[in-house]
């Protein structure tokens, strides 16, 4: 069986205030074409379809259009993530019974979507995002709530999956889960799901499943192996922060053999716009023609802040997103804070401030000015 695994579309998200809907439409169009070209048996979307619980109407329209286009070629199985509103994402799920399967309710855990190929049946178990505060009650086997942790509620969900799978001899098994599995490498753009300081689930929790299609982390990766079980993140199809600059964005093409053996191939997605994180003096940054079409973050290292800094950079880089002014050689903020905690001389503190801001030592006139201002302030408060 051939499956296409994706996640973390985050429709409706912006990047430093820039609307990403056109870029998202471009990468989802690639996904639709890939599903058709590879003749996949199903597309698996492991949560975070939307970026927020109440998505903009344009994001809802894009999701609806993408579902319709995918359903022309294959079955689409979607589960909810921590950014989604399970109720809103799951609207209409009871009438989508053929090519589109939305699973967002805890009550549906343990009830699979059944697929089949020439080698036999495959049971796909989409787990909605398991918020410990609600799932610990809904998934408790008795009146006593489960422990308030991702590990406890995911383990309980997997017990329901295994109980159903035990009654399906000869079925290969796939699970969709939106979770932070131990060993995964996060980026800055995922929203924390920590509860009590812990946000992770052990890979062994999913033992006994042939393929676990993970969502939540934005970098494509396989966190760790469990005997007989392949776990993989597809990552987000688009870069959502500069911390993802080095990511190769992709989707996972999954081959599920008749004996349950799994082969995962990451298929790169062309990014509608590249990213560049540039550092240098303003003159250095304005030189040349590179990165004109990229989303750019610029760190400017001149000793003094140049005039009209942002306007001049934006004229050179039309898609400039962020500017950081960081003079070369400036004292580290932590070192300055440590000095402030121990120094009492306004002359020394003033000198440190000038060095931190400009990257150069204060001159005698500046130091004298700090001393004078300090003395006048003491006089005004009567503390002199």
Image: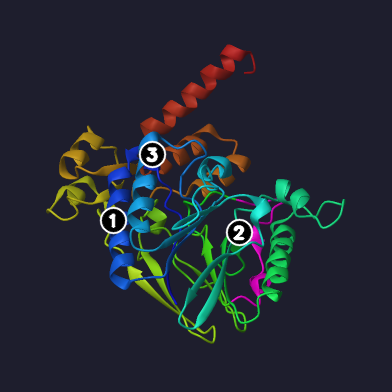
Q: Nearer the viewer, mark 3 or mark 2?
A: 2
Disc 2 marks which residue?
A: 127
Cβ–Cβ below 8 Å for labels 2 and 1?
no
Residue, x 47% and y 23% (percent of image)?
Answer: 372
Residue 163 vertical position relative to residue 227 in the rendered view, above or below: above
- Mark 1 lies on a secondary structure that is helix
Q: Give the crowd class for mark 3: few <14, some 14-19, many >=20 residues within 10 Å.
A: some
Mark linked to residue 29 = 1
The picture places residue 185, in percent across and down from the top left corner, at 52, 65
Cβ–Cβ below 8 Å for labels 1 and 3?
no
Identify the magenta region.
193-209
Mark linked to residue 202 = none
The picture places residue 16, in percent across and down from the top left corner, at 36, 41
Residue 291 occupies quadrant: bottom left
In this image, 77 relative to 202: left or right? Answer: left
Q: Is residue 203 magenta?
A: yes
Mark linked to residue 362 = 3
């Amino acid at each position: 069986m051939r499956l296409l695994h994706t996640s973390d579309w985050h429709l409706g998200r912006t990047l430093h205030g820039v609307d990403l809907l056109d870029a998202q439409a471009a990468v989802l169009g690639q996904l639709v074409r890939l599903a058709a070209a590879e003749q996949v048996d199903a597309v698996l979307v492991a949560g975070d379809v939307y970026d927020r619980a109440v998505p903009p109407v344009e994001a809802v329209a894009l999701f609806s259009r993408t579902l319709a286009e995918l359903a022309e070629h294959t079955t689409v199985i979607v589960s909810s993530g921590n950014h989604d509103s399970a109720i809103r994402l799951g609207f209409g799920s009871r009438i989508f019974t053929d090519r589109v399967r939305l699973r967002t309710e805890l009550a549906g855990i343990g009830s699979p979507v059944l697929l089949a190929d020439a080698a036999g049946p495959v049971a796909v178990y989409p787990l909605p995002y398991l918020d410990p505060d609600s799932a610990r009650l809904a998934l408790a086997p008795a009146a006593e709530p489960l422990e308030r942790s991702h590990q406890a509620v995911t383990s309980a969900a997997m017990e329901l999956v295994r109980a159903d799978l035990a009654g399906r001899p000869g079925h290969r098994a796939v699970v969709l889960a939106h979770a932070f599995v131990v060993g995964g490498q996060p980026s800055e753009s995922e929203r924390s799901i920590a509860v009590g300081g812990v946000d992770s689930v052990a890979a062994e929790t999913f033992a006994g499943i042939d393929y676990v299609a993970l969502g939540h982390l934005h970098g494509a990766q396989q966190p760790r192996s469990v005997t007989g079980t392949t776990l993989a993140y597809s990552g987000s199809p688009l870069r959502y922060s500069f911390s993802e600059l080095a990511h190769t964005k992709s989707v996972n093409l999954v081959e599920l053999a008749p004996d349950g053996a799994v082969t995962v191939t990451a298929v790169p997605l062309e990014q509608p716009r590249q990213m560049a994180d540039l550092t240098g003096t303003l003159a250095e940054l304005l030189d040349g023609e590179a990165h004109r079409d990229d989303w750019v973050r610029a760190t400017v290292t001149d000793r003094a802040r140049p005039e009209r800094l942002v306007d001049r950079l934006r004229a050179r880089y039309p898609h400039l997103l962020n500017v950081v002014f960081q003079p070369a050689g400036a004292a580290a903020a932590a070192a300055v804070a440590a000095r402030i905690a121990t120094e009492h001389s306004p002359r020394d503190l003033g000198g440190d401030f000038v060095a931190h801001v400009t990257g150069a030592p204060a001159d005698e006139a500046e130091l004298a000015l700090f001393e004078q201002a300090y003395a006048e302030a003491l006089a005004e408060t009567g503390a002199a």
